[in-house]
Amino acid sequence: MITIERVSKRFGKTAAVDDVSLDIPAGDSVALWGTNGAGKTTLIRCVLGLLRFRGRVRVGGFDVRTRGKPARRLIGYVPQELGFYDDLGVAAAVRYFARLRAVDGVEVEKVLASVGLEGHGGKRIRELSGGMKQRLALGIALLGDPPVLVLDEVTASLDACGREAFIALLSGLAGSGKSLLFASHRVDEVTALARRVVLLEKGRVTGEVSPQDLGVRLGAQTVLHITLHDRVRGRAIDVLRARGFPARLNGVGVLVPVPAVQKVAPLRILAEERIDIEDFELLGASTHEEHRP
Amino acid sequence: MTTITAGLSSGMRLRVPTLSANVLSVALRELREAVRSRWFLLYTLGFAALGLGVSYASSASAGGAGLSGFGRTTAGLVNLVLLVVPLMALTAGAGTIASDRERGMLVYLLSQPVSRLEVLLGKYVGLGAALLACICLGLGSCAGILAWKGDATRPLSMVWLAGLSFGLALGMLSVGMLASVLARKASVAVGTAIFLWLALVFVSDLALMAGTMALKLRIEELLAMALVNPLQVFKMWSLHAIDSSLDVLGPAGLYAVDEYGGRLHLIFGACLMAWVVAPLALAAAVFSRRAPV
Amino acid sequence: MFVVLTMLLALTGPASVQEGMAPPSAPALSDGPVNTGRLGAMIREAAPGAVVLVPAGVYREHLRIDKPLTLIAEPGAVIDGGGSGDIVEIAAPDVTFRGFVVCHTGIDLDRENAAIRVLAPRATIEGNTLEDILFGIDLREAPDSVVRGNRVGGKVLDIARRGDGLRLWRADRTLVEGNTVHDGRDAVLWYSTGITVRGNRSVRCRYGLHLMYSDEVTIEDNVLTENSVGIYLMYSRGVMVRRNQLVRNRGPSGYGLGLKETDRFTVEHNLIHGNRVGVYLDGSPFTDAQPGVFTRNTIALNDVGITFLPAVRGNRLSANNFIDNIEQVSIAGRGELKGNQFWDGDVGNFWTDYVGYDKDRDGVGDFVHESRTLFENLMDREPKLRLLLFSPTQQAIEFVGRAMPAIRPEPKFVDEVPLMRPVAVEVGAGGAPSAVGLGAASAGILGVGVFVLSVGLSGRLAAGLRGKSGRGGGA
C-alpha cells in the first residue's frame, strides 16, 4: 500500500532521511522507532508529499509527488498535535475537512461518537483537552474511510490516562485491514499497534524487529519508586547515582529507572548504606526521558 | 470529481476533490476567519469612519452651496483608499500563510488531499472577498451619508471607486501573499508588508518628486514611472473614470489623455492586472517548492 | 426662469446641454418651396426706412442690405446660404434684422464667411437663429448697434477651423444681450468702447467672451460654461464683470476669467466654479491707477482658485468665498503676492481651508489666514508635480512643512481678517454655503480615524511578533 524507495531528504548539510526503503502492504502496521531527530517525522512528511525529497514514495500506486492529491486522499493523518483554527467549532471542523476530502453525507455526530467525542460538536477546538483534540484529529483522519493511517507521535503530548484511551482507540483500527505507518518512541504504543518495528537512527534504517523483540532488545525497563524520609533523600540520590542509577527526586521519595532484571539492586544499595526505606513500588513504563532508547 | 480505485481492495472507491471545490472550501474558511478576526473589524470600522469623515466634511462644505465638481469628496475618498486599502490588503496577505506555517496549520492542511495551488488560491479568493466586503461597507457608508446630505455625487462614480479599490486591493493582496510565502516568520512577513506599504505610499512618490525637481524628468518619463506604482495607477484610473479627464493632474494628466485617450482604461487595467497576476504567480511558484514547516 | 435654466445648464452634464441645443437638422430647413432671389428682390423694391415682412419659406440666397430697412421674418423664414460665402451683409446704417433662421455659410476662414455681417452703424440684429455657420454675427465699424436674443450655433469643426460666433470690431456703445452661442470659436469684442454684454450664454466655444482693447465695458449676467476659457479680458480699461457664471471652462488653459494687461476693473458677484483655473491674472491691473477689485465672488471647486503670474500686483480681494478649490491661490513659478491684498478694511475672504476659530464671535477669525503649504509651493514651481495630487504623500509633505519650521515655506499670502462664514453672492441659486470651521472639523475627524488605524496597525504588529499566540494573520 505504501512503497518507499530510496528516499533521502537533506536539510542543509544534515541528512534527515538517508536512503530509506520500506514497503508496507495493505493491512500491515509498521512503527518507526527512533530518538528525536532520527528522521521519523521527516519520513512521514515525505510520505504525505509535504517535502521535496530524492527517491520515490507511492501510496496506493500514486506517486506522492506527481499525484499528491489522490495519494493523500488514501491517507488519514494524525499529527502530534492538532494545529488548526482554535476558534473553529468541532462540528464545523469535521464538515470542513469532509469537504476537503470530498466525503459526502457525513454525519458529524456519528464521526464524533466513533472517537468518543459525542456531544462535543458545539464546542470550539480551543475548549478541548489534549486527548480530545487528538481524538478529533483521528475522527477527521478517518473521514471517508481511507485505507492508510499515518500517525506521527500521536500520544506524545498526552497524559497517561489520555494515552491509554487513545491507544485503545487505535488498536481497534490496527486489525481492521488498514495499513498503519506510525512514528513512536513508546514501547506500550508499539506493542499495542505494530506488527513490524523499523529502527531509525540518524535518518538511516538500522534494522527491523518484531514488537516483542523490541522489549528484549531494549532490556525492557521499569521504574522503582522508593519512599524515603526527606532527611535522607538527597544522600540516597547521591549514592544511587554513584552506582550508575539515574535516580531523581519525586514527591516523598526518589524515582529510579532500572532494567527489568535489576529491580532489587537499588534497594540493596540503600540497605548497604543504611538508608531507611519506608516503602517502594514498581511503576510501569514511563514518560521519563531515561526510558527513551 | 474523479474517482480512484487504483491499488485498493475491491469495492473501495474514493473520490478526489476537484480544484474548484477545494479552492471554494479554503476560500470560505478563510473568509469566515477574516470576518471574525478583530483586525478585520478594526480596519473596516476605521475605513468607514474615515470615509464618513471625509464625506461629511466635503458635503458640508460644497453641498450646501449646491455646487458639485471634482471637489474634496472624490479627492478625499481616493486619498483615503490610497492610504487604507493597500495597508489592509498587504498585511492581510502577508499575515495569512506565514502565520499558518508558524502554527503548524499549514502542514495539517496540506496533508489533506489538496494541492498547494488550491490552498494559495483559496486563501487569495477568501481574503479578496473579505477585502471586498470591507471596501463595500466602507464606501457604502460614505455613499449613504453623501446621499443623505444631498450631495450630487453620482452613484456610478461610487461604483467605479469601489471597483477600482477592489482591483488595487487584489494587487496588494498578491504582493502581501508573496511576502508571506517568502518570509520564514509571520512577523517578518507583516513587517515586510508594512515596509512595502510605506515604499508604495510615500517613498516612490517622494522619489518621483525628487526626480522631477532634480533630474528634470520629461512628462512622459514621469508618467511612465508613475504607472509602475499601482497606487498611482489606481488614482489616475479613478480620476479618469469618475471625472472622465485627468486634467486636474496638470501637464502630465493632460499629456496622458491627449496621447492615449480612450486607451487609458486599457493601460491602467493592464498595469493593475500585472500587479495582481505577477506576484501571485510568483507566490504560487515559491509556495509549491517551499516546505510548509 | 432664465436664471433657473442657466443654473440647470451649468450644473448638468454636457449630455443635457447637447439635447437642449441640438442644431435643427439640415433636411428640415430645405422643406417647403425654395425661393431663389426673391428676398433680394423684396429688398431692392423696398423704400429706405420701410418695414419689410418676410413670409415663411426657404430663401436660398446671399443678401446685401444697402439701405435703412426693417426686415422682420414671419416664423419659418429661412435664409439658406447653401454652404458657401457670407449670407447676409448689412451695408447701410439703421437696419433692423429680426427673427430669421440663417444657415449654412461657407467654411472659408480666410474670407471669414459669416451668417450676418454688419458694416454700418446702428444695426439691430435681433431674435435670429443662426445654424451651421462659420462666423455668426460680425459687426465691423458698426457702433451703437444692438445684438439681442440671437441663437448662434457654429459648425462642429475642429477648433482651429471654426469661426467666431460673435465679433465686434469698432462697434462702440453696442449692446450685446441675451444671445446664445454654442460650438463657435470666440465671442470677441475688438476696439469697442462703452459696450454692454449682458445675459448671454456661451457653451463649448473657445473663448466665451474675449475682450480686446475695449474700454469702459460692462459684462454682466452672462453664463459661460464648458468653453475653453470663460471670459478673457485683454488690454482693456475700465471693465465691470459682475453676476456672471463661469462654470467648467476646462480647455488647455481653462480659465474661468482671465485678465491680461487689463486696467481699472471690478469683478463682483460672479460664480466661478469647476474651472481648471478660476481666475488667471497676468499683468492686471496694468497700471497702479486703481486697484483691481475682486469682491463677493464665489470661487469654488476649481483646480486652482486664482493664479497670479509672478509680477502681478495691485489687486484687492475681499468678501470672496474660496470654496474647496484644490489649490486656492497659486503663483505661477516663483514669486510672491505681496503687492496684492486679501482684505479690504476689516473684511477678508471666506476660506474653506481656514483652520482658525472665532472666539469672540465677531464673524472674523481670531487668527490670520496664512497659506503656506509646502506641496503647493513645490507645485507652483513645477506644475508636473500635480500628477502626485491627492496622494497621501501630498499630505505628508504638507504635514512635514507645517511641523518643521526649517523647511516651512514663506506664506504665499496672508488674509488678516478671514471671514468665518461665506458671503452671500447675488448670482445663482444657493450661492452661500453653510460651512463653519470646516477645516478644523475634518482635520479632527481625520485625526480620530488615523488614530484608530494606527492602533489597529500596532496591534497587528504585536500579534505578528507574538507569533503563535493568536490568529493575528486573519485579515
Image (cartoon, rainbow, N blue to C red):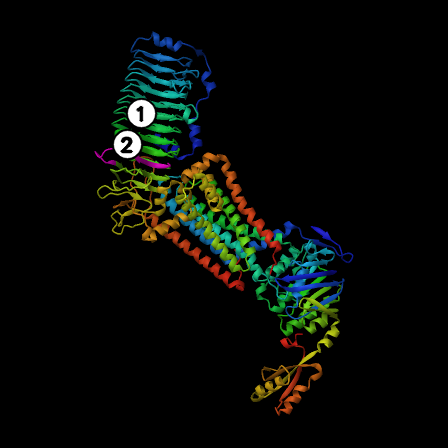
User: What residue range appears in magenta?
Assistant: C275-292
Note whether C385 is above or below C267 in the view shown. below
Type of amino acid under label 1: Leu
Q: Give the chain of mark 1.
A: C
Q: Amino acid at mark 2?
A: Glu
Q: Main secondary structure of the magenta part?
A: loop
Badge 2 density bin: few <14, some 14–19, many ≥20, Cα 10 Å:
some
Q: Magenta stretch: residue C289 in it? A: yes
Please state the horizontal and vertical placement of residue C279, each as a whole percent of the image.
32, 36
State the residue at coordinates (38%, 26%).
Answer: C185
Q: Residue at x 74, y 60 (%)?
A: A3
C79 or A180, which lies in front? Answer: A180
Q: Position of residue B184 (x, y in %)?
A: 55, 59
Which mark is drawn over residue C157?
none
Mark yes or no: residue C178 visible: no
The quadrant holding residue A203 is bottom right
Mark 1 residue element: strand
Residue hosting label 2: C261
Marks 1 and 2, how far apart at CA: 16 Å
Q: Which residue is mark 1?
A: C189
Quarter of the image where one finds residue A68: bottom right
Query: Seen from this angle, which residue lies furthest top?
Result: C45
